[in-house]
Amino acid sequence: MMGNKESELTSAIMLYAIRCLDEGDQSALRSMNFGPREVVALREMNLGDMCHIESLRAQCLKIALNREVYWPMVAHVRNRRESEDLQKALISADAGQEMMQTFFGMGGREYVRMRRMLMVETTSGRPPEPNEADTQILWEAWKQRVEGHEHKLLSAQEYLAMHEETGIALRVIWSQTSRWAEHGQLPIARSDN
């Protein structure tokens, strides 16, 4: 006889409790309200017993959500997913390994793996120099973002937005703006003539 989702949950929790027992994790067992008698019964269970439990429709568990743990966990998972989505978007827009290292601490192997996974063509060597028109477009886009800010390094999202706005590859944007920032060519100091 097939169980239902409640019996599957009961079975999974019972397996977890058996694992806690096997590993000597008494505090986990106590937090699930397993007392000495329940631990003895748990210790006597075998695989056949677990199959029978799964076929029963009985619910012996009281599950409760711990909001103090749940919301930070959800926030962490969301942040991680957003970071991974941003990394994929950056690599798809031809972000170089140096840029990914700067923002995410991504090493060379992980960078190559992600490029392969996203089926982004591998490029080697220095990024191409932008032509005069692209340089001017890039300068204006960069100027809008760094003018009046102490920090010359933009966020990864701002670099992606610049790529989307200008259509220039991130590898080129990173190289050019890094050069401008390194040489102190802030837009305020540059003549737009």
Image (cartoon, grey):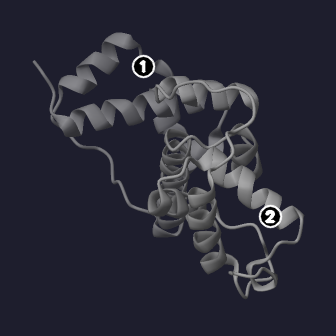
- In the displayed structure, 185 sits above or below 189; it is above
In the image shown, does 148 or 83 lie closer to the viewer? 148
For the C terminus, give its image quadrant: bottom right
Q: Which residue is mark 2?
A: 180
Q: Residues within 10 Å of mark 1 (few under 14, many from 20)?
A: few
Residue 56, how many percent across, how many down? 18, 29
Q: Secondary structure at mark 2?
A: helix
Q: Amino acid at mark 2?
A: Trp
Residue 44, how many percent across, how many down? 46, 19
Of pointers 2 and 1, the one earlier in the residue sequence: 1
Q: Is residue 188 left or right of residue 9?
A: right
Residue 104, how many percent across, how many down? 70, 49
Q: Residue at x 46, y 25 (%)?
A: 119
Q: Residue at x 61, y 43 (%)?
A: 95
Count of labels in the image: 2
Q: Which residue is mark 1?
A: 45
In the image shown, does 73 or 106 lie closer to the viewer? 106
Q: Amino acid at mark 1?
A: Met
In the image shown, does 73 or 137 lie closer to the viewer? 137
